[in-house]
Amino acid sequence: MTNASTRRGFTLLEILLVLVIAGTVWMVFAVNMEGILDKDPMREMERSFTVAQVDGRMIAFENKQSLELAWDENASRFVLVGDSVISSYPIEGLEEQDLKLKATFYFQVPTFKGELFEKPEWYEVESVVFYSDASSAAYKVRLEVGAQNRELIIEPFTGFVSERSS
């Protein structure tokens, strides 16, 4: 048995305790910094759109009712509309910024040439419809935040987003 006055260094338990405390402090710091640094207006608008699209497909499927996803330009938010407004999706964290926000929807109309599809044309529409089977027509949305813009092309059956920035 060793005397406390002759013991040198730290025990494994003491080292592990210090590592756990340091790791916890670092994790809290990193999570808070991510929230502060991650306020890119375009990313916030895209998040709001993605949540609105996923919710719209789920609600349409659960209620067996078609819904429309539209952009409310006066309030700068996405809205889901059935017989009335079902839900709204504001762009979070941009209240203090004076940015012009706009979302424009486009519907895809494929045309046949013989047995092949020609390059599809896009037509601007007011809203996008989610059907009761959770599908939609192929569409794209153009998100505009100030001078930045981004086009997201949405796959009709799964709702997967393939991004195309301009």
Image (tube, rainbow, N blue to C red):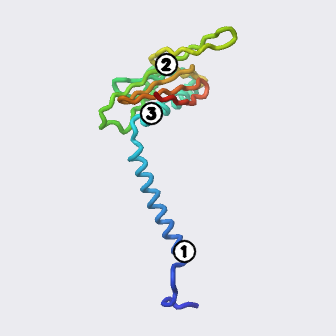
Three-letter code, disc 1? Leu
Three-letter code, disc 2? Tyr
Establish if 39 lies above or below 77. below
Estimate the x, y position of residue 48 in percent, counting from the top left: 45, 33
* Label 3 vs 2, first from the N-terminus: 3
Q: Assess disc 1: are there few (<14), some (14-19) or many (≥20) residues with their C-alpha within 10 Å of its C-alpha.
A: few
Residue drawn at x 61%, y 23% is 133
Q: Residue 118 sits in which quadrant?
A: top right
Q: Which part of the image, by quadrant, shows the N terminus?
A: bottom right
Q: Residue furthest right?
A: 115
Q: Secondary structure at mark 2?
A: strand
Residue 106 numbered tag: 2
Estimate the x, y position of residue 10 in percent, counting from the top left: 51, 79
Q: Residue furthest front?
A: 166
Q: CA distance from mark 1 to mark 2?
A: 61 Å
Q: Assess disc 3: are there few (<14), some (14-19) or many (≥20) residues with their C-alpha within 10 Å of its C-alpha.
A: some
Q: Secondary structure at mark 1?
A: helix
Residue 48 numbered tag: 3
Q: Is residue 81 left or right of residue 93?
A: right
Q: CA distance from mark 3 to mark 2?
A: 18 Å
Three-letter code, disc 3? Ser
Q: CA distance from mark 3 to mark 1?
A: 46 Å
Q: Residue furthest top?
A: 114
**Total number of numbered labels?**
3
Residue 13 numbered tag: 1
Estimate the x, y position of residue 137 in percent, counting from the top left: 57, 19
Q: Nearer the viewer, residue 164 or 6?
A: 164
Residue 161 numbered tag: none
Establish if 90 lies above or below 130. below
* Label 3 vs 1, first from the N-terminus: 1
